Amino acid sequence: MLTDLDNPMTDENKKQPLMMPLAMAQSVTEATESTTQSQNKIEIKDFTLYYGKFKALGNINLSIPTNKITAIIGPSGCGKSTLLRSLNRMNDLVPNVRTEGQILLDDEDLYVSGVDVVDIRRRVGMVFQRPNPFPKSIYDNVTYGPHLYGIRRKYELDEMVENALRQAALWDEVKDKLHQSGMALSGGQQQRLCIARALAVEPEVILMDEPASALDPVATLKIEELMQSLKETYTIIIVTHNMQQAARVSDLTAFMMIDNPQNRTGKLVEYGPTIQIFTNPKLQQTEDYVTGRFG
Ligand code: ADP
């Protein structure tokens, strides 16, 4: 069933700027300051990505601040997921990918030779659209990463499991059934288990690719609340097609589009504090998209 949460462009709010909660309006100054003052966790500089001959991303420049939620929005096919996956070199898994430019994580370029890609993927974790727990127990799902990194002592693993599940707001629901299958949980619980699995290796950044699009509205709100608590510790970047969700959860919003229908190259159109992008965008293209006039 489609709900307003899934499809924000109902007749009622079509062509109206999305209304911001007061708390969000008050955070404008904070969000603006974050782009100018606080240290950026990630700097994307003139980044271009080709799938074979197809230029999927063209000259993207974006600064992602520490301990904030940055949303990437834009029509389907404009390169949002490609950009997100570039942030932990997940695109390396696709044959014939070539990149130009830089992506700096704490000033370290992820795309120079000799970079430890396994370590990058530990530091920059990822949560996918569909909850994808392993067909293992809840406990084994969370300890999977720590195990790979050589942690074997039971008391250490026990502590990691509890910490990660608490941070993912799942501990109270599963603490008495840690050895039951992760696949037996509800969709929303499975997604929080996947978040716990990502947290267990102590990342610094969490990438979320439409993390709630397969969930019902109640489970969606739980994930959104969870994101607010996680940003105190982590830097979060979320791709979402749901503009109300971007408006609710993010501090900053990056709007992408294809350059033109012939080349279909994804470009960054506008980036700024979420309140500004949704209520007072600088560019007509952004306004047309956030008010539902196209896309
Ligand atoms: P979005 O997330 O905005 O929907 P994507 O990043 O998934 O966009 O895709 C951007 C463009 O790159 C699209 O034209 C898509 O067809 C293309 N693309 C995505 N993944 C691949 C791939 N593995 N190989 C070739 N082209 C791809």
Image (cartoon, rainbow, N blue to C red):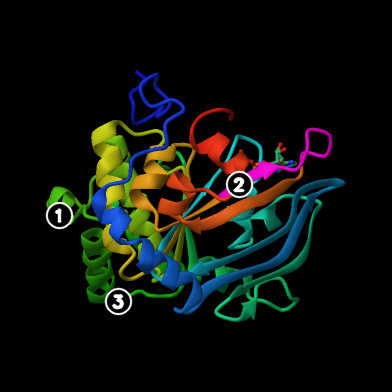
Magenta stretch bounds: 255-264
> Which residue was labeled with disc 3?
153
Kindly report the distance in space between the C-alpha atoms of the residues bearing marks 3 and 1: 19 Å
Q: Is residue 230 magenta?
A: no
Counting from the top left corner in percent of width and height, residue 176 is at: 12, 51
Kindly report the distance in space between the C-alpha atoms of the residues bearing marks 1 and 2: 49 Å
Nearest the viewer among 25 and 85 is 25
- The answer to whether any part of residue 60 appears in the image is yes
Counting from the top left corner in percent of width and height, residue 82 is at: 64, 49
Residue drawn at point x = 76 percent, y = 44 percent: 265
Dot 1 alpha-carbon crowd within 10 angstroms: few under 14, some 14 to 19, many 20 or more: some
Q: Indicate the secondary structure of the residue bearing disc 1.
A: loop
Counting from the top left corner in percent of width and height, residue 260 is at: 78, 38
> Which residue was labeled with disc 1?
175
Decide whether the magenta segment is chiefly helix, strand or loop.
loop
Dot 2 alpha-carbon crowd within 10 angstroms: few under 14, some 14 to 19, many 20 or more: few
The answer to whether residue 165 is above or below residue 260 is: below
Kindly report the distance in space between the C-alpha atoms of the residues bearing marks 2 and 3: 55 Å
- The amino acid type, in three-letter code, at marker 1 is Lys
Dot 3 alpha-carbon crowd within 10 angstroms: few under 14, some 14 to 19, many 20 or more: few
Residue drawn at point x = 72 percent, y = 50 percent: 94
Quadrant of the picture in which ligand 1 is shown: top right
Q: Indicate the secondary structure of the residue bearing disc 3.
A: loop
